[in-house]
Amino acid sequence: MERNRVAAGVVMVPCVLLGAAFLSTAVWTEAAGENRPLAAVIGVLLMLAGLASLRLPAVADAGLPDPVTKPDGVEDSP
């Protein structure tokens, strides 16, 4: 299976943005309060998940056969 870079980007962008928001809340504002360590952990995990989506290879199709495609103009319906 070929790696889909668009799908990886769709996963990466929200994860990195949310991770950055959690980290910035944990570091720079008083809004986190006593949940500051939790916000920092969630931020780091989201950042790592987003960046890992770009680095991990595509997962194989678990033994499924390759899909068969027909050339344009060929109809094989009854």
Image (cartoon, grey):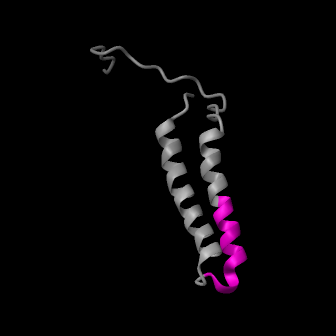
Residue 60 horizontal/vertical position (percent): 64, 31
Residue 47 horizontal/vertical position (percent): 63, 56
Residue 45 horizontal/vertical position (percent): 68, 60
Camera-nearest residue between 51 and 10: 51
Question: Left of 66 or right of it: where is 71?
Answer: left
Q: Quadrant of residue 1?
A: top right
Q: Residue 68, relative to residue 55: is it above or below?
A: above
Q: Which residues are magenta?
A: 32-45
The residue drawn where x is 32% and y is 21% is 77
Q: Quadrant of residue 76?
A: top left
Residue 18 horizontal/vertical position (percent): 54, 63
Q: Split into 4 quadrants, where in the image is the C terminus?
A: top left
Name the outermost residue toward the left. 73
Q: Residue 29, relative to residue 73: is it above or below?
A: below
Question: Left of 74 or right of it: where is 42?
Answer: right
- Magenta span: helix, strand or loop, mainly? helix
Is residue 66 shown in magenta?
Answer: no
Camera-nearest residue between 78 and 31: 31
Is residue 41 shown in magenta?
Answer: yes
Camera-nearest residue between 70 and 20: 20
Q: Quadrant of residue 26?
A: bottom right
Camera-nearest residue between 64 and 7: 7
